[in-house]
Amino acid sequence: MEIDTLGKYRNFLLPLSDCIAIILGYYFASVLITDSFLMNPTSAVTRNELVISIILAIIIFQIVFRITKRYSNIVRYENNQDYIIYILLSIISILIVSVIEELLLNMKNPSIKYNLAVGIIIGIIIIAIRLSIKYILLSEMGDNGTDYSPEKKKKLLIIGGGYSANDIIKTINTTLKGRYEIIGIIDDNKKRRGYSVAGVRIIGNRNDIERICNKYDIDSIFFTIVNIDNKNKKEILEKCSKTGAEIKVLPSLTEIITKENLFNSLRDVEIEDLLGRDPVELDNNNIKSLIQDKVVLVTGGGGSIGEELCRQIMLHDPKQLLMLDIYENSLYDIELELKSKYPNSDIKAIIANIRDEQRMFDLFEEFSPEVVFHAAAHKHVPLMENNPSEAVKNNVFGTYNLVNACDKYKTKRFILISTDKAVNPTNVMGATKRMCEMIIQAKDKESETEYVAVRFGNVLGSNGSVVPLFKKQIQEGGPVTVTHKDITRFFMTIPEAVALVLQSITYAKGGEIFVLNMGEPVKIYDLAKSLIELSGLKLGEDIDIEITGLRPGEKIYEELLMDEENLQKTSHEKIFITEPMNFTMNDIEEKLDSLRVLIDDDITDKTQIKDTLKECVPTYTSPEEFNGEKA
């Protein structure tokens, strides 16, 4: 039976199949059920009465099934709940038939047990017919007619023996018949060892993964555990990554709760799965109180961090969201996204350059932002090494313009998005961001505005992040390039970083630099190796890692705290506060004047600019000195 045929004639074929089920049900009941078992000896059904009962049952069944919209069901999506309903409706229909026979037709009715048995038998036959139709349909649509020979089948290992695995196995055995050969299931529950899920045996625990993959030459691994902590998930996935098999994972329960078919939720393993970071818990009430009904400005609103800031800020009902950026394309994208999601909210996209002091003052006068998140910056280390004057103009003086605008127009709170590269900087980008931290700490001492900074490391998936570069290199066949075999970095996801930024401001009193707990540092070489393995490739055979040497201004590893800073705890385990440094705005103005002279005179000599930056930022040193001391 072709799918198109059933779709075209379903309004005829399904009722017809039910008529056949009714006839067969009465027939089996009359043959299988003896008088002594369910019927009184005096209540035997004659042939004429049987025919009348069948005709009447067909009419009643059609009425009941149409009233309850049974024929509106898509047969291949019916489940156990539907099948129970078929049994109940069959019993109800037969009972209605028996009442009509007795009250209106004066027929001698068999016992209630007989009628219940007939209803159950008819219901079972209806279900059997529908299951047969479902099997035929799913077989035909399974692989679009593709014939998978045993050699082409992928050998599959499933991690987790729960409900998700059960659903995925059923999907593979129906819609993907012939594509996979399921070897077995891995489950750490010792009590389940040797048992089966949907006909597939549990053959080991996490410590058996590599052995089983080698023994059976596993091609694919499906990780189906959704209620697992990140530490255990990371440990299991690391074992899977060593097998060379293709790995797919189910997202968390919150991500798949609306999915009808769990198989469609399977995705490739992301590097986030291997970080082992637990979800961030937030005090949303405190965050909301700082944003709700406020005019909020986000600079760099089209960047990776800026976009996510805008998304999460909108969750707290600001009076107005102002998204500012110099690059129009990405700003236009986030504007479309948010206006589509929040059609009744006041969201404005503003094209402007933070270097333009008068433009900033005009915008503050027009909109009077109460909270400013400053994410706009030049962040690419090697590019800023080659263009130091641009880094100074944008990062230092752009921030200075915004700081002064906030002070003049009485902005309540200013939040600088800083970086771990500002700590003992070895490059222009880090030095300029450290200057920004110094500006806001000094300005806070003399302004009504509360100025704070939030410092964190690398975020996965951001523009210029190493992970997208590695993925692209792997897709192109390699080599994957790493600058130094020992280089390490801190990582967190963009949503996590932004969530902690928002939480940080609830602790702000002014002048603080908040430091986010980035977890354990990650070796970039190991990161590249993991991505290669997760792609089902073997390092040294399918693809290589090439060590290219440290880039200009690059550290072997980053820090989150300077030696002279003392770290204080907050009530949130992932947020800390550094002790404010002791300098004034007069000190900062002198430093800015020395930089301003270079900019005003269009000095492009890189050495001169860097030397001046070193005078302004005492902790700024060369990467050679830093790496030599720390190596």
Image (spheres, rainbow, N blue to C red):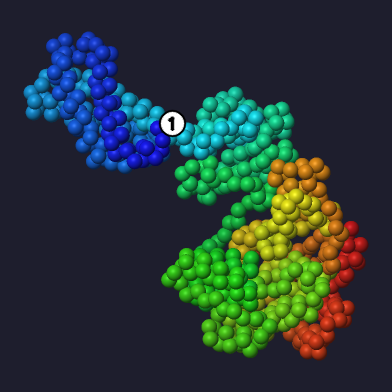
Residue at image location 56% in from the left, 25% down from the top: 195
Quarter holding residue 610: bottom right
Check disc 1 and report the residue beneath it: 135
Q: In which quarter of the image is residue 165?
A: top right
Q: In this view, does 523 lie above or below 425?
A: above
User: Residue 351 vs residue 520: left or right?
Assistant: left
For mark 1, give the secondary structure. Answer: helix
Q: Measured along the vertical axis of the image, is residue 204 above or below residue 352?
A: above
Question: Label 1 neighbourhood size at 10 Å, few (<14), some (14-19), many (20+)?
Answer: some
Q: Between 624 and 408, which is closer to the camera in this rendering?
A: 624
Name the kind of residue labelled 1 in the image.
Tyr
Tell me residue 73's x, y (percent). Answer: 34, 40
- Which quadrant: the C terminus? bottom right
In percent of the image, x 58 and y 56: which residue is there? 281
Residue lying at 63% horizontally and 74% vertically, measured from the top left: 327
Would you say residue 170 is visible in this rendering? Answer: no
Q: Quadrant of the N terminus?
A: top left
